[in-house]
Image (cartoon, helix red, strand yellow):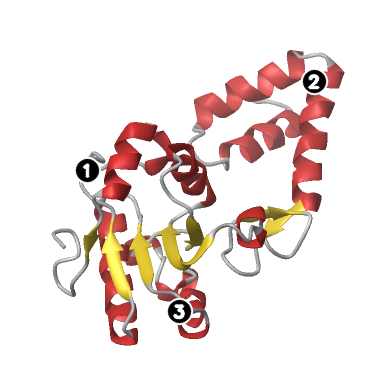
Amino acid sequence: MSYSSTVQELIDSLGRLPGIGPKSAQRVAFHLLKAPPEEALRLSRAIVDAKERVSFCARCFNLSEGGDECAICRDPRREERIVCVVEDSQDIVAIERTQEFRGRYHVLQGAFSPIDGVGVEQLRVKELMTRVGEEDIEEVIVATNPNLEGEATASLLVKYLKPMGVRVTRIASGLPVGGDLEYADELTLGRALEGRQVLDAGTPADG
């Protein structure tokens, strides 16, 4: 049995979303088709509103709504000399829940993974180096995920930042290898931030 072109386009569009396979795409599509019209319209309006109102911060590349800079970059109470580098904006939300970090952030918008076509040019590394060079930054905390891509990204940042004379640290163990910051609990993340270690070229994971 084949679906109509309209239904198939909906399934294909949903299937292009991260984490949604063909079966899940079909389930979501049929849920939307069976749902009351106002539910589907509410979802479509939320997507359109988000695309129109939300952009990326011109300074740290976190999600921003209502200005060129995000709320954290605009907050004068944040410590400007310490910058925590994360892969994605959802990692900021996870770290903020710990209430252990009062500095600023820099979002790479990905992790170094040449096999997946993600190199230095696809990440916000150049912009980070510009910030280190122009702002009074004393420490860069590398809070990339504790997996192969995250460790490769940490090594890359050490290579570029160490020659600039800035202190580069890595959040400490306590986060499970292969895990994501997004799913870590507040206590684990808080301890990892407190126990961060200085990174040296060649041995970023061990400090």
Residue 16 shown left or right of residue 172 in the figure: right
- Work out whether 129 lies above or below 124: below
Q: Which mark is residue 155?
A: none
Q: Are discs 1 and 3 less than 8 Å apart at CB?
A: no
* Residue drawn at the location 41% of the way across and 45% of the way down: 100
Element marked by disc 3: helix
- Work out whether 188 lies above or below 165: above
Looking at the figure, which quarter contains the N terminus? top right
Residue 63 shown left or right of residue 178 in the figure: right
Element marked by disc 1: loop
Number of marks in picture: 3
Provide residue 53's location: percent of width, then percent of height: 79, 51
Nearest-to-viewer mark from 1 and 2: 1
Nearest-to-viewer mark from 2 and 3: 3
Looking at the figure, which quarter contains the C terminus? bottom left
- How far apart are labels 2 and 3 at the CA level? 46 Å
Q: Which mark is residue 132?
A: 3
* Residue drawn at the location 75% of the way across and 40% of the way down: 47
- Work out whether 98 lies above or below 169: above
Q: Answer yes or no: is residue 109 visible.
A: no
**Amino acid beneath label 3:** Val
Q: Which mark is residue 39?
A: 2
Provide residue 132's location: percent of width, then percent of height: 45, 79
Query: Which of marks 3 and 1 precedes in the sequence?
Result: 3
- How far apart are labels 1 and 2 at the CA level? 39 Å
Residue 154, located in which quarter of the rendered image? Answer: bottom left
* Residue drawn at the location 65% of the way across and 40% of the way down: 13
- Disc 1: which residue: 177
Query: Which of marks 3 and 2 precedes in the sequence?
Result: 2
Provide residue 16's location: percent of width, then percent of height: 57, 43
**Neighbours of disc 1 within 10 Å: few (<14), some (14-19), many (20+):** few
